[in-house]
Image: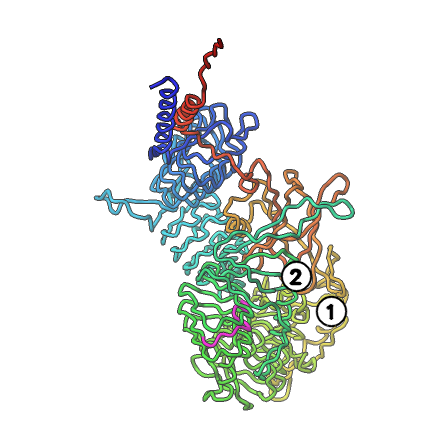
Amino acid sequence: MGRRAFRRFCGALLIIVALVVASFPTSEANAEETKSVATDFQLDGTTLIKYTGTATTVSVPDTIKVIGEEAFADNTYMTTIKLPAGLEKISYAAFSGCNNLKTVSVPSNVTEIGTAAFANCTALKSAAIGSSTKTFGIGVFTGCPELSSVTGNDRIICENGVIYDKEKTQIYEVLQNAKVKRDASSNDLVNMTSYTMPNSVVKISPYAFYGCKNIEKITLSNTLEEIPEYSFSYCNGLTGLSIPYSVKRIDVKAFQYCVNLENVEIPISVTFIHDTAFDGCSKLKIVAPEGSYAANWFKKFDNSNVNIIDSEDNNNSSSGGKKDASGNVIADPAYVVPEIEGLLSETKIVGRQAVFFIDNTKQKVVSGPGAKDITGNSNNTEEYSEMVEQMETALQTETHGKGLSLPKFAIIGDKVAGKAFYEDKTLTEYTIPSNITSIGDFAFARSNLESVTIPSGVTHIGYGAFYHCDNLATILVPGTVKDIEPSAFDRTRMMSNWKMYGESDFLIMGDGILVAYKGSGNYVEIPEGVKQIGPQVFKDNKYITEVSIPDTVWRVCEEAFSGCSALKAVGGGMSVEVIEDRAFAGCPIDTVRIVDTVRKLGIKAFDPGAAGNDSAHRTAVFSSGTLPLVSYNKTTSRLTNSSYRGDALENVNVAIVKNEDVNRLNTVLDRSESGFSGLVCVISDEPTEYFNGELKIIDCTLTAKEASSIDIPSTVYIYGKGYNFRSDQLESVMTMARSGAYYEDVKEVPTVSFTGSEEKYILDVIKDSYVNISVKDAYKRIYGDTVPANFTTYTIYMTDADRGVRITKFGKQTYPITIELPDNMPTSNLHVICIDEYDQLEDLPFKVQESDGKLSVQFDISHTGYYGLYSFNSTAVSKYNLDVSPDTGDRIHPKWFLAVGLLALGLVMILIKGKEKAIVQA
């Protein structure tokens, strides 16, 4: 064989070997375990800003002293993290959402571990705190279901999954997977279902027991000072609790969504309970001393109408950066549908938005043909409520903050979302999931449902939930349903059939709720066993002159007898606890009787003036020494329903109480509660056969302006008998009232108003101390990401300046809000968001303005509630700006170097030419 042939043979052989080497499989260890490289780390001096690699084993450079906020957030590749010995601080949410991270050991030099540092690391099974760690943030290990214990140090200890300070004076956190020995003689570990707090504990951190669903019983320390925000939220197993006397305060959403929490004993020492402390606790019963702060607070708490909707919504947003004609930065209205499983291209129009509703029980899109003329054509000719028509009109025209097109879930946790299947003409049948507890407003309205079985466990059916389902002939409602809002079943075939063929004049559903009445008699005797007289059941009935209410009834719902213009006598009802808004408005009842058991009285519950009663026949008698509190329904809190707002005892001039020293503070007879405007009296002498009785005035709740415009006669009638005021007392009191001696006219405070309206409203924009959990959760469910470090939330309130009613929705109206941008909030990639009443996220258009060197953001709102600002930072959120070929962070396997080398050598040997011999010519 010649040289050239041999060379070519060797080259070919090398190429074959190269191909064989290239075909060798990578070892399993190398395939699964990759290591980080230097280019994966974005640094600012000794601070690690962001890690961008995809290695499974990550070694942080030795020079790093601080792990920045969200530096590794939502890294789904990393299983092992090696931190440098010189590390001093782990910042907020640094490793949050790293759901494959299995173990972490904090070096001994780390002194501070920030809030949520390892939150939602769902695979984390082992964690050790550095020996120098002394600052331990809020919820460091929240959402780590596999973590049952943490190795502590001399300052921070962990016992049975509970993390304390050294002296056990503070509880930092209780691990969701906390374990205890099955019994003293066994080493078997079981979930901790009962916990007794050491009496040395005086403080627990916010979120301390957050999401501890296994715990059913907790005994609190008798030295505990307060129950902070969100400390027991989502403790679903907790059924009861006794608050020790040492506690003075229960803060924001402390027991939010403790859905099985029933009996809570609260001592007289508690002097503050936040309005949201027990949000979502639909079974709540507070046991407290009569007259205590807790007892009075619970009287205002309506656990039959509590909002227990879990947020599980969708949103995507566009980047800011565009400018208007004035050069102001304005949000880009463009919207790209995110890649969400189960979301198709069909939409429906709700509130002038294209809204994607995802039926997340079946993973298909539920969509309708778009908004229709709401008056529509229908074969159903039954009369329907003016109020539901107004509500549905608002549904179609509300701007929802002029939010961008957003996907939304039909099922939110254990709730059917409001408007979820609205106008879905393709929907003829639907199986409501068995875990559902609440059906939202207009959830199935105007759909083509033909029958529906509401599962046992549902407790609440929202406003107009099945309204105008013209084909809906069969509705099975279980006994678990305790709350049916107005017009839930109006204009359904079931209602039409019952009106035509039903044997009884009374239609009763759920847990004894009287839903409808079709009789025409003058005297109505409500059947024994009815527990609630439902909304609008007798509304505008012109025939009824007398009604008898059984003692089984505990609630008279909104507008139950409103407009019954002939109703003068109401008997029975000795167990009624709640009389809702406008329940008897417009009924010519001479004397309003408030029985002993009534603890809540709705706005305009009684309004004899609207029925034409003269001023001598506008009295109310309280038979108990404990007066009810004022309450109001959500329809009253809508901006457009200003006519619904007033006093609970509207146009009642004289209120008779049992004795002079009755407590009126924070009750219906407290001027500040908008319950009553008139004279509070006691009966000093009963009438005789020949003489009227006598009244003694003990208080006057009239302002100077009201006193000048009201005429109270010298004789008034109580149950048909005349009573005179004490000699000259009426004139003296009214003279003093007109001078402002009792109550001066309301002093001017800063108010806002809407175009075309003279009503004044008080607007409050409050920056939250912590990121609002509802907004935060809604954001995270959409993006699968922890919130940006500059995420800032605000709570916006609006209050009717005259009546003190909180306004929630503005209908067609919007109001501009201007908020100064926080210092750490860049205008690039800025977003303004809010959540709707179902905790579904909305992204709002806005513009940025500059005045006196200060930047502010302006946006329009159409409802009050929770709002937020944030800005994506390209160095902190690499997830949203990956290039086409992102750096994987993996090293090239050595086999490729060998294969390429052999291949090159082989080609060279084949292609190279040797020296040609010279040809010698003769």
The amino acid type of the residue labelled 2 equals: Thr
The main secondary structure of the magenta stretch is loop
Where is residue 96 shown, x and y percent of the image? Answer: 47, 41
Left or right placement of residue 171 versus residue 600 in this view: left
Where is residue 671 shown, x and y percent of the image? Answer: 65, 64
Q: Give the magenta-colored segment's residue range.
A: 441-451
Instruction: Check if residue 446 falls in the magenta segment.
Output: yes
What is the quadrant of residue 557 in the picture? bottom right
Depicted 474 relative to depicted 520: above or below: above
Residue ID at (60%, 39%): 873
CB within 8 Å, label 2 to label 1: no
The residue positioned farthest toward the left in the image shown: 185
Q: Residues within 10 Å of mark 1 (few under 14, many from 20)?
A: some
Tell me, what colour scheme is on the image? rainbow
First in residue order: circle 2 vs circle 1: 2
Return the residue nearer the eye: 170 or 127: 127
Return the residue nearer the eye: 422 or 347: 347
Depicted 745 relative to depicted 844: above or below: below
Residue under numbered circle 2: 399
Give the distance between the C-alpha atoms of the residues marked 2 and 1, in whole angstroms. 37 Å
Which image quarter holds the N terminus? top left
Task: Determine the secondary structure under disc 2.
Answer: loop
Residue under numbered circle 1: 706
Return the residue nearer the eye: 263 or 424: 424
Q: Is residue 295 visible?
A: no
Return the residue nearer the eye: 693 or 241: 241
Task: Determine the secondary structure under disc 1.
Answer: helix
The amino acid type of the residue labelled 1 equals: Glu
Q: Nearer the viewer, mark 2 or mark 1?
A: 2
Where is residue 664 shown, x and y percent of the image? Answer: 59, 65
Q: Is residue 64 visible?
A: yes
